[in-house]
Image (cartoon, rainbow, N blue to C red):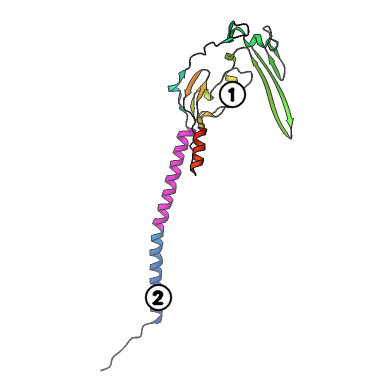
Amino acid sequence: MNRRYDRPNRNNVKNNSFGKDNNVSKQREKRRLPILLVIAIDVLIAALALLIFSLYYFILPRDLSQDSQVLPEASQTEDTNTEGSSTTDTEVSWSTKFADKFTKGEVEKTENSYKSANVNISIEKVQEDDVTYYVADIYIADIKYFKTAFAKDTYGKGYHEGTDTIAENNDAIIAINGDYYANNAGIVIRNGVLYRDEIYKIRWSCTTTAACRRIQQMR
């Protein structure tokens, strides 16, 4: 009997091995794609969460004045002089104590000063060590002439307004930018109204017993 054996074609063997390599690489690519997709989704979720947090706490306006409380006026304090008679603070007003700083009713204005029966302001420009700054000396006849104001006239977060605009809206003679209370902790009082009554607390970390003792003494 004659038997016939076909020799495998080398080209076919090479093609088959090449095909197997392609299949393995494709499977690896398919495995990589879901991992990259999961990472991309996680990054997008984190970015979206940060965006929502920033919008809510720093960008979108929120009125927080619902819990405000008007504080009672300060009571008069009595002082005893050397002769034994008592006097109150209101008996010697600032307008009397600093009478030379105020006018009889007229208003005197220059480029760097303002003087009236209730307010005296003088501004000095100072240049030192390549630094320019301004110093304002202010005298008022009564504390009621010292006022504060909010951006958009609202206590809350997310309200922004230039100092010049706030000053113009409140007929201010001189204005200084505030403390940016919205992003700071602590008590907020404006014009006799208590808006926030939260004491700023610093949390300490103790590394040693001695350090903790010193911290406790400082509180």
Residue 15, disc: 2
Point 44% across, 48% down: residue: 43
Residue 198, placed above or below residue 193? below
Point 48% across, 21% down: residue: 194
Q: On the rendered structure, is 18 left or right of 107?
A: left
Residue 2 image point, x, y percent: 28, 93
Q: On the rendered structure, is 105 left or right of 59?
A: right
Q: Nearer the viewer, residue 109 or 90?
A: 90
Q: Residues within 10 Å of mark 1 (few under 14, many from 20)?
A: few
Dominant secondary-structure state across the stretch colored magenta: helix
Residue 213, placed above or below residue 82? below
Q: Residue furthest bottom?
A: 1
Q: Name the amino acid type tagged 1.
A: Thr
Residue 189 visible to the viewer: yes
Q: Any magenta on residue 53?
A: yes
Q: Residue furthest left?
A: 1
Residue 146 placement: quadrant: top right
Q: Any magenta on residue 141?
A: no
Q: Name the amino acid type tagged 2.
A: Asn
Q: CA distance from mark 2 to mark 1?
A: 79 Å
Q: Which residues are magenta?
A: 33-60
Q: Residues within 10 Å of mark 2 (few under 14, many from 20)?
A: few
SS assignment at label 2: helix
Residue 76, placed above or below residue 209? above
Residue 12 placement: quadrant: bottom left
N-terminal of the pair, mark 2 or mark 1, is 2
Q: Nearer the viewer, residue 86 or 72?
A: 86
Residue 207 image point, x, y percent: 49, 44
Q: Dot 1 corresponds to which residue?
A: 165
Residue 59, placed above or below residue 142? below
Depth check, mark 2 against mark 1: the one in front is 1
- Quadrant of the drawing holding the N terminus: bottom left
